[in-house]
Amino acid sequence: MLHFPIWKRVLIWALVALGVALALPNLFYNRVETHNDAAAGLESGAPETPELRADLAQWPGWLPSSLVSLGLDLRGGAHLLAEVQVEDVYAARMDALWPEVRDALRDVRDTVGTIRRQDGPPDELRVRLSRPEGMSAALEEVRALAQPVVSLTGVGTTDLEVSSQGDTLIVRLTEAEARATDDRTIQQSLEIIRRRVDEVGTREPTIQRQGTDRILIQVPGIGSAGELKALIGTTAQLTFHPVLGRAGSAEANPGPGNIVLPSLDEEGVFYRLEKTPVVTGEDLVDAQPAFDQNGRPAVNFRFNPHGARKFGDYTAENIGSPFAIVLDEEVISAPVIQSHIPGGSGIITGNFTVEESTELAILLRAGALPAELTFLEERTIGPELGQDSIEAGRIACLVAFAGVLIFMALSYGLFGLFADLALIFNVALIFGLLSAIGATLTLPGIAGIVLTIGMAVDANVLIFERIREELKTARGPARAIELGYEKAFSAILDANITTLIAAVILFAMGSGPVRGFSVTLGLGILTSVFTAIYVTRLIVILWFERRRPRTVTV
């Protein structure tokens, strides 16, 4: 009767104590935050000054120091509005198409004569034929390269528009393909920005599309808009180009189909490269910080099978030739290919620090931005703007908390007080879990906590009402309490699982504020079930074992 093993009692109280300990730093938010900033400064190599030691002493080092981060609407942060330069993607698409067009025209060389790529607008590929009379054959060959447009609005159309002007063949994207490319570019930019800003998934940034080519980015807890721009503004576009030679300056004429790029490490040195890369960072599947054979920081990289095949074939065919590794239009290094490099892996060396090699590896893993971002609007939002929201949220939580406590005490007497005690533990566990995972609390998150407070006692109401029913059968108080918990368990589980499924769907499908609400709601469901089924039951058992009442009034 009401048997609870010792190990289970110890485990329950240990989990409650752990949750309270993790939530405790949030009661001393400013002191703990000062301590954390000082600890981070020492770890980064800052000199240990008396002021820094005083800040470090604000909070004991042996206690948990994780805090619930406050969102942009509660604490402030950075706000950016960026415009995606989709024209860059058109130019890259034309550059990537040139080898295919060249190979296709070589099949009809007798008819079209020699071919040469001409300079033109970024969104066009222009090819001059030495025999204009073979233009119809050239048009037929190039049009055969067109593929169907992959979009709902482009069904039945192809991606390339091929025309001629005198002795020049012109290739450009069709209007349907341009629209589809714009959509893909924006979606890819959104995902890459999200991965860079919120790699662990708990910062809860607001990253969403605005209009046709703009992206809104709001990240709480970041000190300035400049810091956010530094995090996402780098394209981290890695490419590998054949080296044609060195150039005297950036203004040197590279020739049709070529480019001149500066060296990252050697000041005043410029390289003349083929504009079309052999392989790009889009084929990268992994990048990790490492050290080269001389112990200097470097980055190991690995290509997917497609990139590995192209990389291996080129190195096998060009042994003894220099090969430029280009990052964001700067030549990191231009080593000479000594031997065939199979397997699709290699190492990027340069004058890196450990921090720079780590940051470069992260950017490469997150993927390259498909196009440059132009920041049209940037703001740093101060914490005072969210003070009204904090006060409103605090009042809502206190009113909901007080109302539930009073209702349970009046409705169920001593058992209601047991439920109130468990509700206090429940809120502590929610904040403890939020602190442990480093989640960000937003105004919708506060709404989730308020809703959880109201829902938390539902399980206790089911249990207490079931105990009332069992007491009417004269089974005795111990047996009535035990049956009340056992028979209410399935109803509690069913009700909370359905709500938890809704929270998971909101988290998976939503973003920003919606995710903030779903996180607190989901954690609140888990802690509510735990406190109702185990904590209140253990409190009731301890009371019953101490008092041994002959009758129980619920």
Image (tube, rainbow, N blue to C red):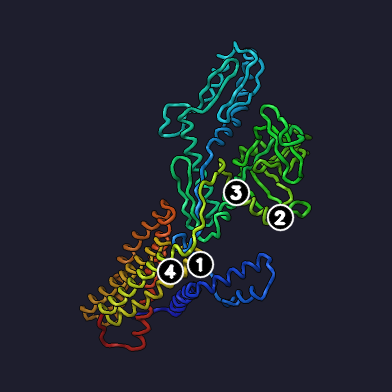
In the rendered view, does 413 fall on the left or right side of 18?
A: left
Distance CA(mark 2)–CA(mark 3):
18 Å
Q: Which residue is mark 2?
A: 353
- Residue at which label 1 appears: 436
Query: Which is more N-terminal, label 1 or label 4?
Result: 4
Q: Residues within 10 Å of mark 3 (few under 14, many from 20)?
A: many
The image quarter in which residue 140 lies = top right
Mark 4 or mark 3: name the one nearer the start of the chain: 3
Point 36% across, 81% down: residue: 541
Mark 1 is surrounded, within 10 Å at the Cα level, by few (under 14), some (14 to 19) or many (20 or more) other residues, namely some
State the SS at label 4: helix
Q: Is residue 441 visible?
A: no
- Location of mark 3 (residue): 365
Q: Secondary structure at mark 2?
A: loop
Q: Which residue is nearer to you in this view: 321 or 250?
A: 250
Foreground mark, 1 or 2, reads 2
Q: CA distance from mark 1 to mark 2?
A: 31 Å
In space, the residues marked 4 and 1 are separated at their CA atoms by 10 Å
Q: Observer-nearest residue: 406 or 339?
A: 406
Disc 3 + disc 1, Cβ < 8 Å: no
On screen, residue 82 versus residue 314, left or right, reads: left
Residue 435 at x, y percent in the picture: 49, 67
Q: Residue at x 61, y 31 (%)?
A: 95
- Residue 430, labelled with which disc? 4
